Amino acid sequence: MKNIIIILQRTELNYLIKYDSTRIASDRIINFSYEEFMQLTDKQKITLLQNSLPIYEQEHEVFLIEYNTNSIGYDNGPILEFKGISSLIPLSEIGAKLLSSKLNTDFNVLEPLDPKLYKSFINNRSHLLRYKAGKQLCSLYQVSNPKEEFITDFKTATLFQLNEVIPNGNDSTLAHLIDFNITPSFIPEGNVEAVIKAACVGMKKLNKEVDQITRSTFYSFVIKEKSAINSKTLYKAIQYIEDKTDLDNEEKTRFNKLKNTLSDDGKYANAFLLFSYFYFLKKQIEKNGYDISIAKDDILELKHYDSVVASKVLFMLGYTFSIQTISKSIQSFSKSTLLKAQKNLDLDWSPKEIVEPKLENKNSNQEEKPVEIDLTVNTKQDNKPLITPQNSKGKTKLKTNEGSIKDKREFNLDASLSKNLEEEEEEEEKTPIENKNNEEVSPSIGKINDIRKQEADLFSDNIKTDNKSLFTFQEFENILKKRKSFLSKILNALKAIGIQESEITEEILIKCLKDLDEYKKQNGSLKVAAEEALKIFK
Amino acid sequence: MQWMIEEARLGPEQREIIEEMNDLNGKPVWIQGHAGSGKSIVLLHALTDYIIRNPNAKIVVVVFTHALIDLLSSGLRQIPALKGRTIPVITIYDINGRLYRTERFDAIFCDEIQDIPTVLLERMKKGCNQLIIAGDAAQSIYSSVPNFNERPATKKEIIQELNPEVKNTTTIYRLTRTLISVLKNVYTDLFADMVHIGREDSEIRLFKADSYQKEIEFSWKESKQINIDRPGEVNAVLFFKRIDIIKYVDTVLALEGKKKWSKGTYPDYDTESRIFEAMNKHLNNQGVPLMYVGSDVGSLEQADSENKIVIMTYHSSKGLDFDAVALPNIQTDLGASDNENALILVALSRAKRDLFITFTNVMYSGYNRFLKSTPVKEINDSKNDNDDVVF
């Protein structure tokens, strides 16, 4: 009588004990005795375990049993009986401990699997799940996967964390990137946080104390330029750093050294951009309940300018979070009819023209905020809105990353512009142009001062419209600016359902409030936040 | 807040407990586990299943504070299976009164059992057909339950009184890796969630000063700077006792060159100095970004919207999270507390990103048990300024 190994879930064992038989999937059978199994190479063992072990989250959910081949029945699948089980082998020491409190103490429980073997199996499985998440994220944003060489490097980098090993100077900057998983308090919020954290990776790579970055030329430069850097999208902010440091020899030398260090002497192209984006998007996604659409605009902008880095950063994010963390968000964009409502991740994005104030004095602390203009303009009227009011492509936002985490501000030009201009003219079709020097554009750019003026107005409480279907996210921001946390939640909820600003109705708002459980109190009266949010309809 | 977690997002242990509870037979059930192990979520899922099986049952949920009423009511409203049915969520005082008047329930679901006195346990057991409780008796931070004037029941007393079927939740989901490693120095049975390298870790910084004045100057400077640099975050400074808060406020006001708040000297402040609402007004008038929150004074929401640093006691901070937390004065003897380990656990586990701890001269032994492997720096430690500036 030969014993073979079968993988069993604890719930299956429970039913087998209660009903004396249970049917299992045939891939749970490892056609070796435990003794024969132990003679195999580690690679063979891991492959067998990988093929037979179902997904589980804790080590006591699944175990191996030694089972007598003569007792295997068949009825549309292998049938096991209690009498066929000769012993039980837990996956790990912890698994054994957790099982001990749940199993019959008369059972013959053997020593768990070799810890080294189990660790290798776990690492391999973790890689597969992470790899899947990385690929899905790339697929969702329609970018190709990074090259295998990069994926292998990132897998190695991640293993340091999984095995709680601290990388040293000889290890890759990718390993240091994953290892540096804190935000020290000396780092201010916004885009500067992402770029300083990227610089901290350079410090770690060179075996320097991370907080010594505060003494660096790069840190001083970033702090000096903080408001300018934070007032842009991350991509534009990094471009700004490139341009501005280029004007000063010392700053340029230091910045080049940082970029070279991060690139592992050229191995990882655009590492500074890649690492900054990784930290920036990771924090945004994490702070927003692992909603992978929250950083859409930033990802699409990066994809537009550098699809290779976009591919790497998306893969890195997926790989770091792993599938179980982001599956819910990914699935929310699925076409499955199981979902009551279909959501689209609108990937249409076009660049906006930046009208930068001329950098005359490189040491000036008083940067003027650049104004970003969508290259969608009206070709017929000079004084038409630069941006389609409430268009459906999300092209209308003048967005910066100032206070981007909790209080993600969206400087929405379209609301105020369209509001004023709509009164004068009827809306007309817009034609996208590609050349920013197109003569049709000039008159519009000439309105920059007006735009600035109106941008300031966006923060007044006075924006009102009579049309119930023409509220903007910005107006919510105005009405709820004293409730930052709530504002962030309600905006995310509105955006999550794919609503366009032009479509925000009272019903939709109430639905979102209900989803957030911010609508009514137990006694039926409106909650304070709901009352304030609904004021927009008065 | 999306508080209620769908079943697919629960841990295997939590799912298991919920499944095992579908066969309730009148025997009390006790869901035990550390803070952050999802006891309340399991309780609400169990309640949902109970209602589906017993649609006409008279049910009540019992909690300790009004803040918890909002939290649990919010969780209940997010359960689609309840189809808008309102399940009453009441305080221990309400249930005590109703049971005293011999009202009966089909089922009572009681959270935070560690803060409930024996007399109420008895009443709840007698007043319903099915009692389900959640909480960890070892985690009580009260020496006497307000209004009952009785200490909370111990674990032994709960078992004696109820003889419950115990279900353990051992996995911690909420805390970061670094915080768990510190808490594990004392709570050796803590079992962290599967390695989640995506979640940002917290930083713990521990500093020693040689005088109270220097310590608070250092701590306040740090808190103030974080508040300026990271306005999107909610920051807090926590103290064991409220009189320590008064002393801290006076010290900060002096450092800022502002008018002192208290009358009298530590610890003998006069009654007026202990009116925290007035203290908040004073801080506001003086332009110091600090707000006391606790005992119906101040508000977290207001502190958040006005970008103020929250000051509160360890007790009031239970159940709350902040991005950055300063814990000054950890030389303070916590001997007056009934369960100092539980209280220190509360204080140490409030920070998500940055935990900034300071003490004068010698750290209190209770803290030392937790922080024994955390390096202590002197506040005037000069950094390696001789190092080359590389970038």
Image (cartoon, helix red, strand yellow):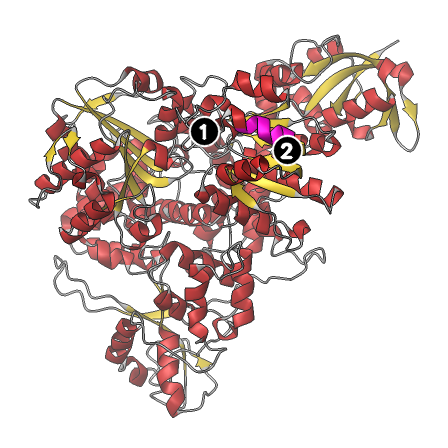
- Residue drawn at x 45%, y 75% as measured from the top left: A537
- Say if labels 2 and 1 share a chain: no
Q: Residue A199 in the image: x percent, y percent? A: 28, 41
Q: Residue A112 in the image: x percent, y percent? A: 64, 13
Q: Establish if A3 lies above or below B5.
A: above
Q: Establish if A46 lies above or below A406.
A: above
Choose between A220 and A399: the one closer to the eye: A399
* Amino acid tagged 1: Gln
Q: Which disc, if any, is residue A161?
A: 1
Disc 2 to disc 1, C-alpha distance? 52 Å
Q: Establish if A336 lies above or below A506.
A: above
Residue A78 visible in this rendered orientation of the protein:
yes
Q: Is residue B122 magenta?
A: yes
In terms of secondary structure, where does tag 1 sit?
A: helix
Residue A145 visible in this rendered orientation of the protein:
no
Image-based side of A140 in relation to B65, left or right: right
Residue range in magenta is B120-126
Seen from this angle, which residue lies furthest left? B257
- Residue drawn at x 36%, y 32% as measured from the top left: B315
Q: Which disc, if any, is residue A97?
A: none
Choose between B174 and A378: the one closer to the eye: B174
Question: Main SS of the magenta segment?
Answer: helix
Where is mark 2, residue-wise? B127
